[in-house]
Amino acid sequence: MLTYLLAITLAPQSVPPSIQPAFEKIRRSLGSDETCKVIPSPDGSFRILITETEHYMSGVGQNQDPRTPQQLKTVKLELVDQLCAVSASNQAKPIAQLFQNDPDVSPNPRMLVNLGKGQGLQWYAHASYERIRGVRKALGLSGGEEPVKLAIRALNVDGSHNAPPAYQDLFAMKDAAVPALERSASKAPVAVQILANLGTPKSVAALIRLNRDATLRSVVELAVSFKKFGPEMKPVYASGLRDGILATQAAAAAERFGWTDLLPAIQARYSHAQDVREALFLRHAIRRLKSNVDLPGLAKSNQIYFGWNDHDTRALLACGDPEYATLTALWMGSIRTKGGAPRGALAKSILQKLRDKGYSAMVDRTAKRYHVETLL
């Protein structure tokens, strides 16, 4: 701490000539709510402190009107990032020693990073990932920690200032980031989501390899559930069907690509479906894969407010599968969409018609199984 305090005491009013060009580049890259200053250290290095000031309103109680001025006060929050510039000709200390006396006054976690060389100096940082990438760009630094490794490391650092920009950078790197993302999947599960979002042949191959690891399988399946993939993702869909995480997506993919070999697994999953929607998609896939006959209702039940009519109801009741018709009506009645017309009455009408055809026991049994008895 003594070295740090001495550095502040010796700080001149003007920026030393040797650091002036770099300092100006950093200063021009800052936002209107950010400031920076140079602090020379006795060991010949330079510190640049970058302070971002945030203001927010505080003092509003749970039952107080936030529009009452006297109940509010402005709170100032300072986020401080620190850079260290060392003469490129000098032997630098270990990076942890460079910042060991710095007071950690930033509430957001920061990273110790070798930024690289530029402006005739070797640069290091104890800063947020977003600050690190900004300084590197402003100074045009070369060398230092590899961008892909740095971005992946930032995914594991707590704090809202680190993960989002790191995620953006890794996504922009595309296939170049895939090997490192695959290696880091066990420590940074968000890396799996980035691989899924990339959706390239290389990233898909990485996901399939990761899916063979039982400890990562559920992470891979969850990541895949948010995006539609082609037939190359069949191994993941198959395991997700067994686990239940990808049941509806796997059923839809099996229909789309004619995977009749998955029919036994779909049938097994259907007997253990978790809710009425999952059961409906599985039932539809079973019928399609068995007979290659499309069943009415599944597509339009998604858009019931905009197109379902009496013709659709008649087609559903005549489809030859009363259990499928029951599931369609139950799902239809359970969907809640803001601003749409009431569909509960239509669902009950279909269920009553099924009762009239002699399927009362099946309707009651199915509703009870999926805990939607209130629709009856």
Image (tube, rainbow, N blue to C red):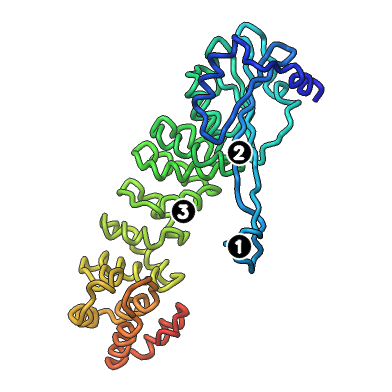
Question: Label 1 crowding class (10 Å Cα cut-off): few <14, some 14-19, many 20+?
Answer: few
- Residue beneath the point at 54% across and 30% down: 150
The residue identified by callout 3 is 222
Q: Nearer the viewer, residue 98 or 316?
A: 98
Q: Nearer the viewer, residue 43 or 90?
A: 43
Image quarter (top left, top right, bottom left or bottom right) of the N terminus: top right
Give amino acid for label 2.
Answer: Thr
Give amino acid for label 3.
Answer: Leu
Q: Earlier in the sequence, mark 2 or mark 3?
A: 2
Q: Is residue 12 above or below residue 189?
A: above
Please say if the residues under marks 3 and 1 sit with CB atoms less than 8 Å apart.
Answer: no
Residue 203: image quadrant is: top left
Q: Is residue 270 above or below residue 187?
A: below
Secondary structure of the residue carrying numbered label 1 = loop
Give amino acid for label 1.
Answer: Thr
Depth check, mark 2 against mark 3: the one in front is 2
- Residue beneath the point at 30% across and 66% down: 285
- Residue beneath the point at 73% across and 22% down: 97
Depth check, mark 1 against mark 2: the one in front is 1
Q: Gap in Å between the C-alphas at discs 1 and 2?
A: 25 Å
Q: Gap in Å between the C-alphas at discs 3 and 1?
A: 45 Å
Q: Earlier in the sequence, mark 3 or mark 1?
A: 1
The residue identified by callout 2 is 53
Secondary structure of the residue carrying numbered label 2 = strand
Q: Gap in Å between the C-alphas at discs 2 and 3?
A: 38 Å
Name the outermost residue toward the front: 70
Please say if the residues under marks 1 and 2 sit with CB atoms less than 8 Å apart.
Answer: no
Q: Is residue 95 above or below residue 320?
A: above
Q: Which mark is residue 40?
A: none
The residue identified by callout 1 is 68
In the picture, measured across the screen, residue 272 lies left or right of residue 51, that is left
Name the outermost residue toward the top: 89
